[in-house]
């Protein structure tokens, strides 16, 4: 997917996405920003293909807090949408001047963050907050995003879950474990069934009619045993 982003065609055909001015790209389509095959530059649009994309980013700015000025970094936000060929998009966020505004966007980001096209019209997207636990220096966001993408969140994108056919056959999807430092042990105990169902639906939809029929027949045999 990383290569396909940079090779999406001529510049005239590429869709692009402009992040907010005071923000940092963390993960694009399951890949850490630092590992992309193109350089992410401030205020420079990100090239996109016409497939579904998932952008994970944080807002960061210096805000006033009483009589002091302090650095604010938002929670990691997950935005998933399907661009059209050659269109330009912008993630629109309010300017953060004080800690009250900063905390408000952390508490209720969906009412304050929007996706717009070149005409300034709203574009539909799916949105979520990436689960976090405290400040984690050196956090591998891509690994946590893969875990997020095995959930039933509307913003999850199973194609970026990191569990391809080979991984599923060799390790078994049910053996996937949650990062307890991020998500907590309770989530580990409750999400296996939801994740398994999500991945079953994903691979069933990807299969050809013959494979689907064989799977249904096999499932019926298992249930009847």
Image: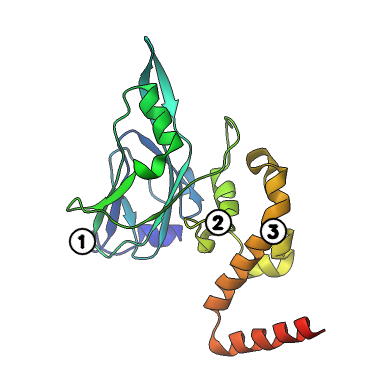
Q: Residue at x 62, y 71 (%)?
A: 200
Q: Distance between the residues labelled 1 and 3?
A: 43 Å
Q: Which residue is drawn at 72% across and 67% down?
A: 170
**Extreme right residue here?**
225
Horizontal placement of 125 versus 13: left or right? right
Residue 26: x and y in percent read 46, 42
Residue 221 placed where, x, y %? 76, 86
Q: Quadrant of the C terminus?
A: bottom right
Write down the residue under mark 2: 149
Left or right for 193, reference 34: right
Q: Can residue 40 be seen in this view?
A: no
* Residue at (28% x, 39% y) in the render: 43
Q: Are marks 1 and 2 in contact (CB under 8 Å)?
A: no
Q: Distance between the residues labelled 3 and 2?
A: 13 Å
Label 1 secondary element: loop
Query: In the image, is residue 29 above or below residue 222?
Result: above
**Local crowd size for mark 1, using a 10 Å CA cut-off: few (<14), some (14–19), many (≥20):** few
Q: Mark 1 points at which residue?
A: 12
Q: Name the residue under label 3.
A: 192
Instruction: Tell us which disc is closer to us: 1 or 2.
Output: 2
Residue placed furthest toward the left: 119
Q: Which callout, 1 or 3, points to the residue nearer the camera?
A: 3
Q: First in sequence, mark 1 or 3: give its number.
A: 1
Rendered residue at 53%/77% (across/down): 205
Task: Tell whether 103 sits left or right of 217.
Answer: left
């Amino acid at each position: 997917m990383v290569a396909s982003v940079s090779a999406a065609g001529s510049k005239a055909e590429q869709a692009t996405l402009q992040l907010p001015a005071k923000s940092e790209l963390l993960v694009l389509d399951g890949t850490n920003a630092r590992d992309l095959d193109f350089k992410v530059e401030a205020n420079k649009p990100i090239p996109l293909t016409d497939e579904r994309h998932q952008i994970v980013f944080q807002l960061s700015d210096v805000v006033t807090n009483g009589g002091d000025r302090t650095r604010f970094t938002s929670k990691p936000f997950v935005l998933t949408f399907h661009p059209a060929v050659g269109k330009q998009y912008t993630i629109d966020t309010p300017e953060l001047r004080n800690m009250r505004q900063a905390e408000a966007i952390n508490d209720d980001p969906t009412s304050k963050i929007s996706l717009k096209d070149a005409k300034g019209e709203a574009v539909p997207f799916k949105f979520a907050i990436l689960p976090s636990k405290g400040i984690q220096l050196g956090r591998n966001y891509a690994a946590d995003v893969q875990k997020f993408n095995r959930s039933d969140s509307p913003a999850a994108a199973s194609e970026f879950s990191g569990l391809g056919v080979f991984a599923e056959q060799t390790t078994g999807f049910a053996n996937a474990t949650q990062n307890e430092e991020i998500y907590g042990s309770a989530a580990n105990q409750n999400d296996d069934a939801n994740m398994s169902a999500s991945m079953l639906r994903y691979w069933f939809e990807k299969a050809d009619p013959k494979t689907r029929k064989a799977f249904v027949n096999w499932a019926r045999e298992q249930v009847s045993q």
